[in-house]
Structure formats: C-alpha cells, structure tokens
Amino acid sequence: MDGLEFRERLHKGERVYGTFVSVSTPMWASVVKGVGVDFAFIGAEHVPYDRVELSWMCRMFAALDIVPIVRIPSPDPYEACKAYDGGALGIIAPYIETPEQVTALVGAARYRPLKGGRLQAILSQTTAAPPRLASYLEARNADRTLIVNIESTPALEALDEILEVEGLDAVLVGPHDLTTSLGIPEAYESEEFVEAVDMIVRKARSHNVGAGIHATYAHALEHEVRWMKMGMNLIVHWSDITAFQRKMRRDLDALKAAMGDIEPYEGLREIII
C-alpha cells in the first residue's frame, strides 16, 4: 500500500491495519511485513530514536509497501516537517486539544514546502494560493496523512471543532492518557472510557475522518471489534514489545509452574508506550 491509498481509505471508511513498531533493527521490517499489516506506527514520542535512525526505518518500511506513520514528539508543525522530510508518509500529533493546533499541522501536511507569512495567510484564509501553486502543493502532498491524538477531556470538548479542520485525515485515541485525563487511570473496561471512545468514533466517521485507538491494553480485542463495527477504520493492534512481553511471560510462567518453581501466574503489568 502507498501513502495515497492509505489516506484515501481513511476518508472512505475502509479499514487499514497496522501495529506499533519500536524495534529498529534492519531485519525487523521483514518480520513486520510477514504479519500482513498495511502500516507501521513508529512511536517517536516516547521511543528515543535519532533522526537518521527514524529516516531509514521510514524508508525501509515504505520500500516494503508498508506505510510508515510517525508519532512525533510534540504537536509542532516543525516536528511534523522533520518526520515528513525523513520519509514518513503520515504523522500522528500527540495531545491535540484545539483546532488551531490542527490547522498549524495542516500547514506541514498539505502545504509543504510553503512556509512563513505566505503559508499563514493561506491557513488563516485571508488569501488563497494562486492556481499554479495550489495544484503543485496538492500534487506534492497528496500522499501525506495527518492524524491527531485525542487523549484528554479538553480534546473531547473541542472534538467537533477539531474534526471540522480541512486537511485532517484521522483521529487516534490515546487510551492511557485519556483515562488519566478522565480521572480513571487505566480503567479501560469502564463505562466512561468506552462511551468516550464510542463518541469519538461516531463523530469522526460522521465527518468522513478516519478513527482509531492505540490499543495496547489488555483484553482490547473485543472492544476493537465493537468499534470496528461502529466504523473505526484505523486499526493499531498491539505493539512488538507488548506481543513479545505477553507471549514470553505466559510461556515462561507455564514452564515454571509445570516444574513447581512458581505459583500459577495471575497477571502482568504491561509497558505503556
């Protein structure tokens, strides 16, 4: 899949499937390719990549027809430009709470390489790009996706205005931060959290904007299916580090329990990325 098809499918409501990738070894890309994903969510917000490392990861995944989507460290259009210039075909901006933040990011996603006062005049709608420039910018940036994290109560309150910003392609729920902002940290099974995600999915799809959730928490599968049936179409399923942790701990504990070295294992606190 290329960046343009990925972006178009988000708006059409067609599902795209991916996973969170933290491993940066070169051989890992072919492993990710083998599981059948459409995109790789590369989390540069919390994982300490440098720009060179991030760039070759993006270009390696793109060469394998896996769309590289980078979560940037902050909701900053300059960070977005760095990710796009490094080879990302989409960015996820963390902790968005206002439509003005989204508009600034639209400048990076839809109008690159235009900068400065000319860009601000277009974004503020005080002037329009002349036809030749408009055609150039549209063609040059057609395969670049803009996704924003919805992960706080102020973001929920401003959701309608955020979704109305032209140039936004999808929203992604941040479950850990959202539950914390709601005052119910890690209560992923709570009615309050589930209803908040229901609202985000419904509203996003009513605006023809893609919707997803960073689903790395336990027992997420039944909720993922529920939200997909509601229209959620940006599917971020698990992460490499979570899959390794769950599988290895389960198997090792089964071996230890079989030999009487430990009592049967009852739970595991997962790494939050």
Image (cartoon, helix red, strand yellow):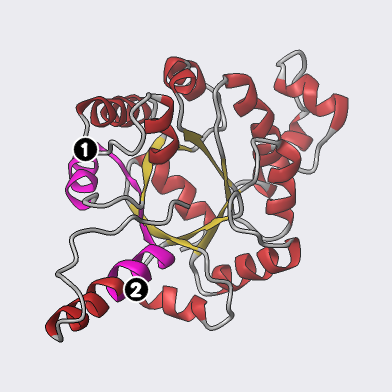
Between 169 and 43, the one lying in front of the other is 43
224 with respect to 44 (left or right) = left
Task: State the residue position of label 1.
Answer: 189
Task: State the residue position of label 2.
Answer: 35
Specify start and end residues of the magenta stretch as a single range: 221-248
Q: Give the vertical position of 107 relative to 53 (above or below).
A: above
Q: Is residue 173 visible to us here? A: no
Residue 69 at what x, y percent from top left? 54, 54
User: Mostly what secondary structure, the magenta segment?
Assistant: helix
Between 265 and 19, the one lying in front of the other is 265
- Residue farthest to the bottom? 259
Between 183 and 143, the one lying in front of the other is 183
Disc 1 versus disc 2: nearer the observer: 1
Nearest to N terminus: mark 1 or mark 2: 2
Question: Residue at image x 74%, y 31%?
Answer: 131
SS at mark 1 in the image = loop
- Residue 50 belongs to the span the image colors magenta: no
The label shown at residue 254 is none
Q: Give the vertical position of 44 relative to 114 (above or below).
A: below
- Image quadrant in which you'd find residue 79: top right
